[in-house]
Amino acid sequence: MKQLCCPLNGLRNISEFLYGGEYHAKPDQISCSARDWAEHVFFDENNAGLVIEWWCHLPTSYWFLVERNTVSDEILRSFPCSDIYKQRDDSPASASRDKGGQGE
Amino acid sequence: MDQSPLTLVPGSLLRRSPLYRRHAETGASFRQVDDCAVPYRFRSHQEDTDMARQLGLVDLCGLTKVGYKGPGASLWLGQEGLLLPAEPNLAVLQPDGMLVARLSLDEFLVLRNLESDSSLICDMESAWSLDSAVQTYLLPRRDSHCWLAVVGAEARQMLSKICAINLHLDEFPNLKIAQTIIADLSVIIIRHDLGLTPCFYLLADVALTEYLWEVLQDAMDEFAGATVGLAALLTLKTLLVESSK
């Protein structure tokens, strides 16, 4: 059985994981075009070669990122998403709701 | 060990294990622990203890347990006086026998000790509020998870039939945690040896308790394991104290 190394739980059988699609850097949703946003939400690059993908360790519901070669199916590394997302990424809508809730 | 007659009828208490009907059919004696009827013995005390030394399955579903999660959880639990594991997937035994398991950087599971009372856990639950425990959220694990124990010299061998994790002592020492899949179920495994007797706690979705119980019983058959009561675990802990003196 294939195995994958989870940054939280270590090396586990691939049956403990769920594939979550390609990782894309999120465009600025205020300034980007509708086309760019649709590309981000709905489309994948499907590159042959090195890609970064979302994976989830199911028993812990832990989402993390994996760098994988789609040609050789070799996994180069896995790392927590906190390596990319340094802080909480609220949408402008929820951020304004939070501000309203605090009476600002 | 208390030898008083056990006449408790599980139905007389509001809280019972999902498995209590099975236990009653197999002649279990129950005892009240906290507000729950817990299977205490299935045969004579000596027979239960001998069985637990070899391979026993214990239903601890009724015992108090609680979870805390959030960026402020480690700070708040530390302020409450708990000793916390430094890393995820480790547990720490508290001075009163309570077990604190760290499931991730920001999530903790607190299991009551087996023998005395759960007042500290209850005090913590009472002290918790959204205002007092900043960015710490209470998880009612007592209602969400079942708690079973596989105990005995054959426990690791038996679990290796249904679990992909290497549970050998060299790889999986006492108080180590694995969050993995057993029989297609997400299960938290916590090793908490009772003296020299290996013991593995299994916690899974409470709605699937009966399925997990049957899977474990089926796996135990070839090792001649059997269901034992809480009293056997308490005795194994006592034996450790005596032998270490």
Image: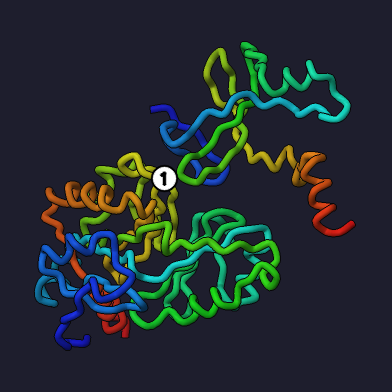
Percent x, y for residue B165? 37, 45
Residue B170 seen? no
Q: Would residue B165 be found to the left or right of residue B151 on screen? A: right
Residue found at x 56% / y 32%? A55
Subunit of label 1: B
Image height check: is B184 above or below B191? above
Query: For residue A102, which quarter of the picture?
Result: bottom right
Q: Amino acid at mark 1?
A: Thr
Residue found at x 76% / y 29%? A26
Percent x, y for residue B121? 49, 75
Residue A27 or A83: which is nearer the viewer? A27
Residue B62 or B42: which is nearer the viewer? B62
Q: Which residue is mark 1?
A: B180
Residue found at x 61% / y 27%? A53
Provide the secondary structure element on which disc 1 rests: strand
Q: Would residue B36 be found to the left or right of residue B177 on screen? A: left
Percent x, y for residue B19? 24, 60
